[in-house]
């Protein structure tokens, strides 16, 4: 069938990139440059010379144009579908990249802020440790002071008790003397009281010792009055010491309570800080690991995006090239149709041009 060689002829003409300004002679010259095209032209020349219809060639050209248009529509649909799919892939990758970038920023901030918090906690735990040591030293010092105060009170209170007992014993001796008891009978008791009075640092008691000295015997009444006065002073002094002891004990109870509460607070704070330091270190380690993972994910997503963009660019370039080629082919078909319609409507005219060109 003669349609096949004619189709080959048209495709050969399409690859010639014919310009609109070329004449029918120039068009046929372009076709004739191809060896197969030259053969087809010879066949066509023979066909026309023997009376073959030009309309058959025109029908073939119309079919080729229809096929080219159909191929272009199919290519347009594929291109549109590929474009939609590509845009979806690109949008997903861009969203994934944005997500990883957000995660990287968040993880970086978490790592940095936690590192800063870790440094602050480590500084504070050292301060709190020092405060605990100071608190314990203060408690020990104040406790020792309080114990010394209490021991002093116990000693002085015992001294006052002994002194009061001595005064009471001296008063009894004087009363016995006043009652007419012989001194010889009271001598041993007197000597004991005298020894206690001599040991006492209290001036009044020393004065009492002098009054009881047989070498300087004052009046009995005067001695009793003096003893009563001294006893009253001792009782008052003992009461004052007891009041001071109770006040100091109450103050220490309050102070020790505060120190103990502060110690408890500091110990709890230190435990909290130490636990926080452990958690901070874990958080930092996890953030660093997650940051490394997110960085790898981001790089993979960016690589995938670059690959997709290159693929899309290649597909677009191929689509544009094929579209351009079909447009050129359609242009060639249209020109051949023009030649056949306007210049080669009769077999004699075609033969004439064929002979002139070739």
Image (cartoon, helix red, strand yellow):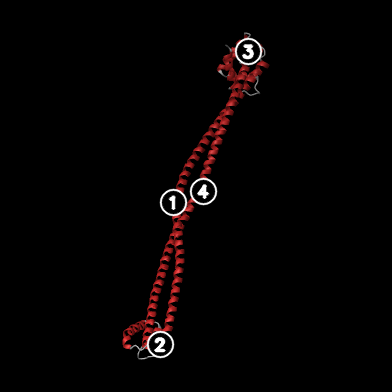
How many residues crowd mark 1 within 10 Å: few (<14), some (14–19), many (20+)? few
Residue placed under numbered mark 1 in the picture = 278
How far from the left and from the top, in percent, is residue 179? 37, 88
How far from the left and from the top, in percent, is residue 238? 43, 77
First in sequence: mark 3 vs mark 1: 3
First in sequence: mark 1 vs mark 4: 4
How many residues crowd mark 3 within 10 Å: few (<14), some (14–19), many (20+)? few
Which residue is depicted at the point 47% across and 42% down?
A: 293
Say above or below: 217 vs 154. below
Q: For the residues marked 3 and 1, what is the alpha-carbon distance in whole angstroms?
A: 92 Å
Mark 4 lies on a secondary structure that is helix
Answer whether residue 96 is visible to the viewer in this image: yes
Of badges 1 and 2, the one in the foreground is 2
First in sequence: mark 3 vs mark 4: 3
Report the front residue among 69 and 37: 69
How far from the left and from the top, in percent, is residue 66? 62, 19
Indicate the quadrant where residue 332 lies. top right
Residue placed under numbered mark 4 in the picture = 109
Judge from the rendering whether residue 335 lies leftward or rightward of residue 288; answer left or right.
right
Mark 2 lies on a secondary structure that is helix
Which residue is depicted at the point 58% across and 28% down?
A: 81
Residue placed under numbered mark 3 in the picture = 56
């Amino acid at each position: 069938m003669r349609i096949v060689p004619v189709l080959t002829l048209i495709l050969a003409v399409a690859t010639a990139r014919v310009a609109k300004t070329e004449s029918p002679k120039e068009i046929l010259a372009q076709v004739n440059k191809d060896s197969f095209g030259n053969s087809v032209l010879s066949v066509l020349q023979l066909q026309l010379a023997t009376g073959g219809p030009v309309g058959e060639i025109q029908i073939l050209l119309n079919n080729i144009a229809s096929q080219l248009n159909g191929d272009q529509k199919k290519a347009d649909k594929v291109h549109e579908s590929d474009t939609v799919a590509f845009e979806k892939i690109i949008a997903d990758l861009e969203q994934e990249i944005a997500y990883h970038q957000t995660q990287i920023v968040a993880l970086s901030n978490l790592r940095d802020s936690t590192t800063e918090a870790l440094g602050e906690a480590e500084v504070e735990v050292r301060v709190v440790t020092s405060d605990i040591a100071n608190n314990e030293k203060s408690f020990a010092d104040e406790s020792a002071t309080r114990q010394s105060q209490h021991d002093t009170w116990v000693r002085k209170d015992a001294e006052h008790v002994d002194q009061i007992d001595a005064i009471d014993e001296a008063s009894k001796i004087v009363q016995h003397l006043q009652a007419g008891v012989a001194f010889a009978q009271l001598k041993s008791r007197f000597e004991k009281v005298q020894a206690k009075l001599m040991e006492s640092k209290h001036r009044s008691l020393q004065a009492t010792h002098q009054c009881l000295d047989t070498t300087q015997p004052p009046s009995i009444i005067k001695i009793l009055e003096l003893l009563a006065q001294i006893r009253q002073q001792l009782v008052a002094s003992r009461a004052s010491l007891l009041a001071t002891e109770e006040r100091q004990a109450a103050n220490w109870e309050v102070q020790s309570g505060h120190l103990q509460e502060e110690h408890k607070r500091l110990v709890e704070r230190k435990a909290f800080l130490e636990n926080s330091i452990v958690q901070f270190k874990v958080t930092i380690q996890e953030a660093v690991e997650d940051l490394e993972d997110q960085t790898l994910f981001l790089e993979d997503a960016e690589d995938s995006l670059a690959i997709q963009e290159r693929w899309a660019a290649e597909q677009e370039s191929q689509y544009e090239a094929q579209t351009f080629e079909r447009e050129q082919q359609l242009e060639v078909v249209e020109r051949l149709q023009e030649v056949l319609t306007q210049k080669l409507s009769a077999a004699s005219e075609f033969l004439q041009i064929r002979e002139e060109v070739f």
